[in-house]
Image: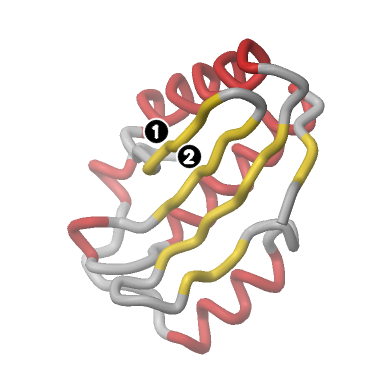
């Protein structure tokens, strides 16, 4: 996939399109109905180093795609939040990045928490 620098649409997705994208995404992702709309997912790990290693892999992906989530992490947890700042909401790139993070999480044996 191209980096956000080259492919992010200038407009946020409509509510109708968002509903479809959410249905396609891992159900652990939550749509935050705020302004701007965002998607987020919580991850749980056995310890700090597993959380840190996961976040490092997410950071590498973000740099490669030039699309950077908000990341909060600490001992045994990480929270990833996406929205496209210059679009003022969610774009296709946010959903593509979230799906890639799900692959990373599977490899890290991350456990979803609510």
Residue ID at (30%, 76%): 35
| Quarter holding residue 84 | bottom left
Report the coloring of the rendering.
secondary structure
Q: Is residue 62 above or below residue 108?
A: below
Q: How many marks?
A: 2
* Labels 1 and 2: the sequence-earlier one: 2
Residue sitting at the far bottom: 16
Q: CA distance from mark 1 to mark 2?
A: 8 Å
**Secondary structure beneath label 1:** helix
Task: Using residue 76 as the reference point, say whether residue 79 is left or right of it.
Answer: left
Q: Residue at x 62, y 33 (%)?
A: 77
Q: Is residue 5 above or below residue 114?
A: above
Provide the residue designation for mark 2.
1
- Tell me the crowding category of disc 2: few under 14, some 14 to 19, or many 20 or more residues within 10 angstroms, Cα based: few
At 48% across and 70% down in the image, what residue appears?
32
Would residue 53 appear left or right of 35 to someone viewing this image? right
Above or below 54: residue 96 = below
Comparing 59 with 34, the one in front is 34
Is residue 9 rendered to the left or right of residue 60?
A: left
Tell me where residue 40 appears, x and y as whole percent. 53, 55
**CB within 8 Å, label 1 to label 2:** yes
Q: Nearer the viewer, residue 10 or 44?
A: 44
Q: Position of residue 47 (x, y in %)?
A: 70, 18
Q: Which residue is mark 1?
A: 65
Q: Nearer the viewer, mark 1 or mark 2?
A: 1
Q: Quadrant of the C terminus?
A: bottom right
Measured as percent of width and height from the top left, residue 98 is found at: 56, 48
Q: Of helix, strand and loop, which one carries label 2?
A: loop
* x, y percent for residue 13: 39, 75
Q: Which mark is residue 13?
A: none
């Amino acid at each position: 996939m191209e980096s956000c620098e080259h492919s992010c649409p200038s407009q946020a997705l409509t509510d109708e399109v968002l509903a479809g994208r959410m249905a396609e995404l891992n159900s652990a992702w939550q749509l935050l109905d705020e302004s701007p709309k965002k998607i987020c997912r919580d991850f749980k790990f056995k310890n700090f180093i597993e959380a840190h290693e996961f976040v490092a892999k997410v950071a590498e992906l973000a740099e490669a795609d030039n699309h950077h989530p908000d990341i909060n992490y600490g001992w045994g947890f990480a929270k990833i939040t996406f929205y496209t700042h210059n679009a003022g909401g969610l774009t296709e790139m946010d959903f593509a990045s979230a799906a890639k993070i799900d692959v990373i999480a599977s490899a890290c044996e991350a456990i979803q928490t609510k």
